[in-house]
Image (cartoon, rainbow, N blue to C red):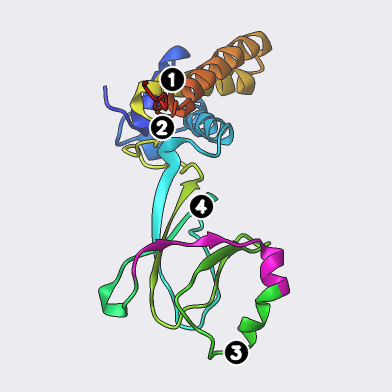
Amino acid sequence: MAYNYLDLTNEVISRFNEVPLTSSGFSSSRGVQTQCKNAVNEALRYIDSKEYGWPFNHATQTDTLVVNQVRYTPPATAKHVDYESFRLVRDPSLNVEGRNLRIMDYNEYLERFVEQEDTTDRGEIPRSVFRTPDNKFGLYPYPDKAYSVKYEYYRFTTELSAATDVPRVPEQFRNVIIDGAATYMYQYRGELQLYAANQAKFDEGVKQMQSILLNRYDYVRSTVIQK
């Protein structure tokens, strides 16, 4: 069985003994079929809302800086930007080495360096990055050349639309998605007992995902000195 929007929807449909969809008729679904499609996306949104740092939502962005420009906008899909990951990209043609950027508090920037925005003759290789109140990022000093910065972020979930769309959630957790979608179907139908039972099962599945995907153990090295 394939792992895509069509097959996930049909798994939900089969739980309710309804007529499955075909790839040709997927976009013209009606009634319960459409509700099952919506329920799959609802389940994915719920899973996404439970963690900022799901590894399957991780992405890396490289931006080319604009000479004399201080502030920049992260991708529209960014839910959380990891400011500790900002670094300059090595570029021998611009005579710049790769290095990490120091995180600067926005208030520190306002108190000490904001006047750089009133001039165009203070450009250098950026050394610091700060987050603005409107969730943009800024650089100090602003760039005097078209350097590149790389950083990492976590994305919002992507709504499934086409029959062949594949969710970012790993396939090993497809049953969690199905349980979640069935939960929303029971809610749509007003079957509150079944809704509550499936919600508990869905939440348990999400907790297992958190345990498997997010519980990390750092490598521990012994520092004992043998005498």
Q: Which amino acid, mark 2?
A: Val
Q: Is residue 105 above or below residue 162?
A: below
The label on residue 172 is none
Could you give the CA–CA distance between mark 3 and mark 2, rounded to whole angstroms?
47 Å
Toward the viewer: 26 or 8?
Answer: 8
In the shown orientation, is residue 134 left or right of residue 68? right
Return the disc, 1 or 3, that comes first in the chain's sequence. 1
**What residue did someone put label 4 on?**
84
Real-space CA distance between mark 1 and mark 3, rounded to the nearest whole angstrom:
62 Å
- Helix, strand or loop at label 4? It is strand
Q: Residues within 10 Å of mark 2 (few under 14, many from 20)?
A: some
User: Where in the figure is residue 196, as x and y percent of width and height?
Assistant: 65, 13
Which mark is drawn over residue 169? 2
Query: Magenta segment: does it hold 105?
Result: yes
Helix, strand or loop at mark 1: helix
What residue is pinned by disc 1?
13
State which region is magenta: 97-111
How many other residues sit within 10 Å of disc 3, few (<14), some (14-19) or many (≥20)? Answer: few
Q: Position of residue 59 (x, y in %)?
A: 40, 48
Q: Find disc 3 in the rendering and name its residue.
A: 119
Q: Is residue 40 left or right of residue 22?
A: right
User: Circle 3 — which element?
Assistant: loop
